[in-house]
Image: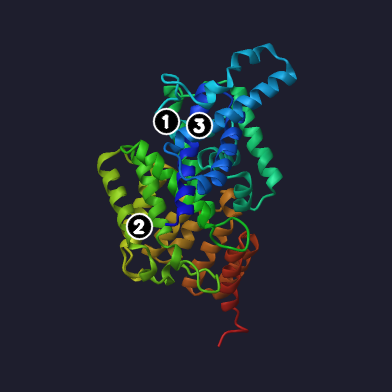
Amino acid sequence: MSDARAAEDLLRGLAPQVVGALVRRYGHLDSSEEAVQEALAAAVTQWPRDGLPEDPRAWLITVASRRLTDQLRSDEARRRREEADALRRPADEHVAPAAGDEPPAEDDTLQVLLLCCHPALSPPSRVALTLRAVGGLTTAEIAAAYLVPEATLAQRISRAKQRIDAAGRSFGPPPAPERGERLRSALQVLYLIFNEGYTASSGLNLQRRELTAEAMRLTREVHRLLPEDGEVAGLLALMLLTDARRAARTARDGSIVPLADQDRSLWDAAAIAEGTALVTRALRHAAIGPYQLQAAIAAVHAEAPRAEATDWPQILALYGLLERVAPGPMVSLNRTVAYAMVHGPEAGLARLAQLEDDERLARHHRFAAVRAHLLERAGDHGAARAAYKLAGRRATSFPERRYLEGRAARLDPRTAR
């Protein structure tokens, strides 16, 4: 790993700890997070030139505190608000904290993550704020990853921080009744980030490696802080087992290679071993949850040396359990695929027809793609071709659209040889 990459990883790991230290001392997530971003930018410039400080975390807290103190004083002078008096302290007190007045030594990464997943925020706002405050990414980096204008992303992040400040909740662990739900929300945010990186919802590329890498790094951090939480372990295992197939998912021209046709020698054996060990331990020692079950399904796929050797009855059983634990339209669709692999395409099509009443699912491109696949396996190539074309029109990702259109073209009798 290069020195620049190591420094970048260090900064991103320290970012939520520094945000937490400032919010704990001053309040104001909005201004604290802005000050930390300035400190991170200063580190990127100064550390390569001057060398790594003896205590990088303390250095960042000192610089960010100085920035925040200056900003608070400027705001107070401009607005002349009496309530800002409580925030005024001598500048050198923040620049070099005296013994006994240093910021808390505890790691605030988890608390900042839970704060970013505040129930007052929408899922897109939680994702953006998590990448900024916990991931340490700049607004420009996040905007580029999600293919949205930087100004739009900046407004989303700013509004999210202001809503949290307006909620008035003091920094620290959420109340006990809220903690479980807030952690589930945080894990969902991390999974959303991972999924957007693994299969981009739009754009020319199938994958956005920077997002999957960041989601996995943050999930590792949460697992480090909560090593006995089965669902945290399950999510990390799911990410590892899924990302292990990354190198085999596309051909040299960028086109999609379906799971059944992938060169399994390209799969990451170390990631598979780590993910399998994680989910195996979690299933033995923790209450069962949806991420563990999804990881178990991914592990069954990973264990098969060839697509034909996949244990589809076991996968079908796991999907049946998942549908009971965490029902949802995509779970039902995936279970239908597994059912068809066990009982045949005609049986799968019959089950698929039962899902058509769910409009959320019936309008999704994956529903049409599954129908097309089952029709093709059943030998009805004309209907399969029409379904592939419909799925292609509905897909928002260019690589997925190109793959689906290619499947349709392959079934065109005018081009058959």
Helix, strand or loop under label 3? helix
Image quadrant containing the N terminus: bottom left
For the point 31% across and 48% down, the residue is 278
- Name which quarter of the figure residue 27 lies in: top right
Residue 378 placement (x, y as % from top left): 47, 71
Q: Nearer the viewer, mark 1 or mark 3?
A: 3
Q: Mark 2 points at which residue?
A: 271
Helix, strand or loop under label 1? helix
In the image: residue 321, left or right of residue 407? left
Judging depth in this view, the residue of 373 and 233 nearest the camera is 233
C-alpha separation, residue under disc 1 versus residue under disc 2: 28 Å
Q: Name the residue under label 1.
A: 180
- Residue 345 vertical position relative to residue 56 in the rendered view, above or below: below
For the point 60% across and 48% down, the residue is 142
Q: Which is more N-terminal, label 2 or label 3? A: 3
Amino acid beneath label 1: Gly
In the image: residue 385, left or right of residue 266? right
Q: Which residue lies furthest to the front in this view?
A: 50
Disc 2 crowd, CA 10 A, few/some/many (<14, 14-19, 20+): some
Residue 294 placement (x, y as % from top left): 39, 50
C-alpha separation, residue under disc 1 versus residue under disc 3: 30 Å
